[in-house]
Image: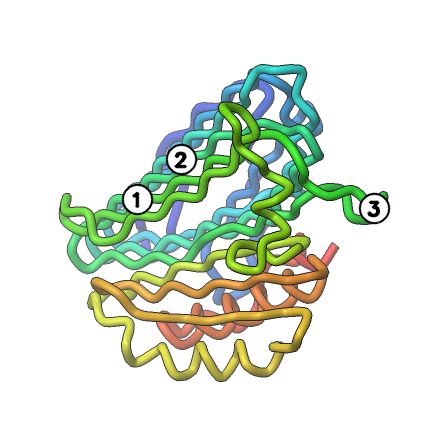
Amino acid sequence: MRDGASRLAHLYQHDPLRVLFPAAEPGDAALAVLVTTSGGLVAGDRLRIDVRLDAGAIAHVTASAAEKCYRSTGATSAIVQRLTVAPGAWLEYLPPETILFDGARLRRRTILDLAPGAGFLGGGIIVFGRRARGESFTHGLLHEHWEVCRSGALVWGDALHLDDRHGGDVAALMADPACFDGAAACATLVLAPPDGDPRPFLDGARVVQQRCASNELRAGATAVNGILVARWLAADPLPLRRAYADLACHLRQAAMGLPARLPRLWHV
């Protein structure tokens, strides 16, 4: 934050990742857009994304399009995302969905480190297979890992693991009513308010989720250890994407007074 505006202090980028900086809408957060120039992840790709906000800065980080993880020939792709937010700063990390082709192998680890008075809104959407082709995710690997720390202490951790090796049956887990119940997509959205109290936002979040809820789209939200966690499970990725965006718009306005909208890239 300098002269009343959030400005770029440091940038390092290396193929196949680049960062673009479109002009944000008036009154909105500074905007950074991640671009995967290779068009997706293939077996063995390694990506590392580090985002750091200094004190008082406000920024929204997204991606230019859905991330595609192609069928693997055996090796596993890995993404490490480290997000660091200094005191009084606010980070939104809201890339579009990740599409897992059948047979993809992906490990993704997201580590969020919040200083006192820092705030965060972010998460992710996972689509199981190329649904337009009638494809599901029946074999492969997905390991999705989240750690949220406040002042250096772990306040929330979450891990999802699906693997067809060592006797694992991904197709059965995807179909099991106690697991994914045949869902085409799932999503998680996390809000860490600057004051560390998510409870004032919980009822409003549930109201927004309920507007979109149906037999095809199930949702829920809870507050734990100073953060709000919302989840969705859907038979169709498109309604889930809309519901996820609706709640993100609501929460950014409720928590920070920012406009109830996402960057235009979200609507392409």
Query: Which residue occupies 58% across, 18% down?
Result: 15
Among the two numbered marks 3 and 1 on one chain, the one whose residue lies closer to the N terminus: 3
Question: Badge 2 is on which residue?
Answer: 109
Among the two numbered marks 2 and 3 on one chain, the one whose residue lies closer to the N terminus: 2
Q: Which of 214/199 is in front?
A: 214
The span from disc 3 to disc 1 (Cα, nearest Å) is 34 Å
Q: Which amino acid does label 2 sit on?
A: Arg
Among the two numbered marks 1 and 2 on one chain, the one whose residue lies closer to the N terminus: 2
Quadrant (top left, top right, bottom left, bottom right) of the C terminus: bottom right
Question: Badge 3 is on which residue?
Answer: 134
Q: In which quarter of the image is residue 35?
A: top right
Q: Is mark 1 on a helix, strand or loop?
A: strand
Query: Which residue occupies 63% across, 38% down?
Result: 67
Farthest right residue? Answer: 133
Q: Is residue 15 above or below residue 249?
A: above
Q: In this view, does 62 lie to the left or right of 239?
A: left
* Residue 209 percent location from the top left of the image: 53, 76
- The answer to whether mark 2 and mark 3 are in CB contact below 8 A is no
- The answer to whether mark 1 and mark 2 are in CB contact below 8 A is yes
Question: Badge 1 is on which residue?
Answer: 147
Mark toward the viewer: 3 or 1: 3
Farthest front residue? Answer: 167
Mark toward the viewer: 2 or 3: 3
- The answer to whether mark 3 and mark 1 are in CB contact below 8 A is no
